[in-house]
Image (spheres, rainbow, N blue to C red):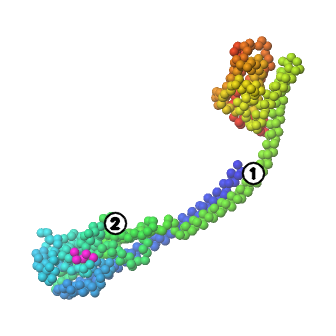
């Protein structure tokens, strides 16, 4: 018990050190989360500023284009192409797909405009879709430069025919300044149904009145391309960025960028892009579950905890070993005392049995030779059982071995005359000696007067377990001389019916049948603890 109590201390020290490490890691993680939250807010500000900066840059180009159309009555295709190339180069500047011109035309004058443009060399120019009867004006795309990224197929498209574009243009006319549209599907992306885009419209006022809008200079944008262009303006790319049109909803998603790592905290902000509302959502990405500082603290904390536990175990083990040596010395002294008392007890019991057997044998003996022979045989029976018990260190004796040892003198050359059967049953030392005396007396009687006195006689010895605590033994003789119950009780009968029955605490059923003697006796089957070494309380 002492070593077990001592062994808890190293584990307790390990638990204390581990808790200290865990608390430290939690504090570090909490500080790291706060730091990352501040960093996330700074990143959100940078990303929002980048998006607004790209929008402002594109609006500046649109204002320049609007000035061109406001100051000239007519702008030819070549003039517009040269102007757009000077401003935007290849057309991918600031994330846009280019710059275009869409005049406002009365529906009843569309055909006239189409013929005028066709006469100028663009024979395939047609406005589509054709306006419905309820509309009086149209805004077809006349110019869109450069002629790449699918811009050519957008020429002639009436932007008033689509609700989101028309709402943006009407608002731009009302406010008199650039306005971004909501989420649309660009004509350039007809083959890609999943692509999202938007446009920025700059109204061009008439040069005469300065109030009437004669058309729009505009730029179309693929949302993913625009976001990629804006990402060049902020530092941290290890974050998730998503842009939504007006509100955070799956169908409002314009564009998103994903980074590697596990999901972290999320933050969102509403920004103004060309007098239109966007929602920017960013999410921090963690490379690992714990921060670097937490992993280092956890590693060294665990190492320190194991070292503390190891040192504690060495100390407690040494103390436990010292205590175990002391207890072993004390137990050896106690065992010697117990062995001495046990030996004294067994010697007394054996001498008492010998004296009792000698006294009874003397009373029944007819002369000194008869007394010597009977006494010697019975003491040998005790000795045979003692030998069996000595082989098991006086813990138990197997019932079958006891029977076999007592019948061994009569089985030499006549093994077929003795039949034994039964399960393995272990008997306590005192019960084994009592059973040995009973079997000896029965075997001696059979050899003198019963089945073993003739060559045709047989003895059957069978035993069974009546219950886990009791075994029953049946002795039956056959083939011997006819049996007559003796008129005078002999020592063997008294030994079996009185002494053995008393020691085994059960009745003995001994019958003298003409066909042969039969005997049934019961032997207790006791647990080992009932015949272990006696302790000091005895």
Q: Main secondary structure of the magenta part?
A: helix
| Residue 212 occupies quadrant | bottom left
Circle nearer the viewer, 2 or 1: 1
- Identify the residue position indicated by label 1 in the image: 324
Q: Is residue 507 above or below residue 136?
A: above
In the structure shown, which secondary structural element does the residue marked by tag 1 occupy?
helix
Instruction: Give whichever of 448, 37 is nearer the camera.
Output: 448
Residue 477: % across, % down: 70, 19
Contact (CB < 8 A) between labels 2 and 1?
no
Mark 2 and mark 1: Cα distance apart in space: 72 Å
The residue range painted magenta reads 149-153
In the structure shown, which secondary structural element does the residue marked by tag 2 occupy?
loop
Q: Is residue 378 above or below residue 395?
A: above
Q: Describe residue 216's horizontal placement relative to residue 56 as left or right.
A: left
Q: Describe residue 176's horizontal placement relative to residue 114 as left or right.
A: right
Q: Describe residue 304's horizontal placement relative to residue 498 as left or right.
A: left
The quarter of the picture where the C terminus appears is: top right
Q: Is residue 468 visible?
A: yes
Query: Which residue is situated farthest in the right direction here?
Result: 368
- Identify the residue position indicated by label 2 in the image: 248
Residue at 32% x, 81% y is 93
Instruction: Give whichever of 416, 80 is nearer the camera.
Output: 416
Residue 81: % across, % down: 23, 84
Q: Describe residue 460's horizontal placement relative to residue 232 as left or right.
A: right
Residue at 71% x, 37% y is 529
Residue 504: % across, % down: 73, 26
Q: Is residue 264 above or below residue 143?
A: above
């Amino acid at each position: 018990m002492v070593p077990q109590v001592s062994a808890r201390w190293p584990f307790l020290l390990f638990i204390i050190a581990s808790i200290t490490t865990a608390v430290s890691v939690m504090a570090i993680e909490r500080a790291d989360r706060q730091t990352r939250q501040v960093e996330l807010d700074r990143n959100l500000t940078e990303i929002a500023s980048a998006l607004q900066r790209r929008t402002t840059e594109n609006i500046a180009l649109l204002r320049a284009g609007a000035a061109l159309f406001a100051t000239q009555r007519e702008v030819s295709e070549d003039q517009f192409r040269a102007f757009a190339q000077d401003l935007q180069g290849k057309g991918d500047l600031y994330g846009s797909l280019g710059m275009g011109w869409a005049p406002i035309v009365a529906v009843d004058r569309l055909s006239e405009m189409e013929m005028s443009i066709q006469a100028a060399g663009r024979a395939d120019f047609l406005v589509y879709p054709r306006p419905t009867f309820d509309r009086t004006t149209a805004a077809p795309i006349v110019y869109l430069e450069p002629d790449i990224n699918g811009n050519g197929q957008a020429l002639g498209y009436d932007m008033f025919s689509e609700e989101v574009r028309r709402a943006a243009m009407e608002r731009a006319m009302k406010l008199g300044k650039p306005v971004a549209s909501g989420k649309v599907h660009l004509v350039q992306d007809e083959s890609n149904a999943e692509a999202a885009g938007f446009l920025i419209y700059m109204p061009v006022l008439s040069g005469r009145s300065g109030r009437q809008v004669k058309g729009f200079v505009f730029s179309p944008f693929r949302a993913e391309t625009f976001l990629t262009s804006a990402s060049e303006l902020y530092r941290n790319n290890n974050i998730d960025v998503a842009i939504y049109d007006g509100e955070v909803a799956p169908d409002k998603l314009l564009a998103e960028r994903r980074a590697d790592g596990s999901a972290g905290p999320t933050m969102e902000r509403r920004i103004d892009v060309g007098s239109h509302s966007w929602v920017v959502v960013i999410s921090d990405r963690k490379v690992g579950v714990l921060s670097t500082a937490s992993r280092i603290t956890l590693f060294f904390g665990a190492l320190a905890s194991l070292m503390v536990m190891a040192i504690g175990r060495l100390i407690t083990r040494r103390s436990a070993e010292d205590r175990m040596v002391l207890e072993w010395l004390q137990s050896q002294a106690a065992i010697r005392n117990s062995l001495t008392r046990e030996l004294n007890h067994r010697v007394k019991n054996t001498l008492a049995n010998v004296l009792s057997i000698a006294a009874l044998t003397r009373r029944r003996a007819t002369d000194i030779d008869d007394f010597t022979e009977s006494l010697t045989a019975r003491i040998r029976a005790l000795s045979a059982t003692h030998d069996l018990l000595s082989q098991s260190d006086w813990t138990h004796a197997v019932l079958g071995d006891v029977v076999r040892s007592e019948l061994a003198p009569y089985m030499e050359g006549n093994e077929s005359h003795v039949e034994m059967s039964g399960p393995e049953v272990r008997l306590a030392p005192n019960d084994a000696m009592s059973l040995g005396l009973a079997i000896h007396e029965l075997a001696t009687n059979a050899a003198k007067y019963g089945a073993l006195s003739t060559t045709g006689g047989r003895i059957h010895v069978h035993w069974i377990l009546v219950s886990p605590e009791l075994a029953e033994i049946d002795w039956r003789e056959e083939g011997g001389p006819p049996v007559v119950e003796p008129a005078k009780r002999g020592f063997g009968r008294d030994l079996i019916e009185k002494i053995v029955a008393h020691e085994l605490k059960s009745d003995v059923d001994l019958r003298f049948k003409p066909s042969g003697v039969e005997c049934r006796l019961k032997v207790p089957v006791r647990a080992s603890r009932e015949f272990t070494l006696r302790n000091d309380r005895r």
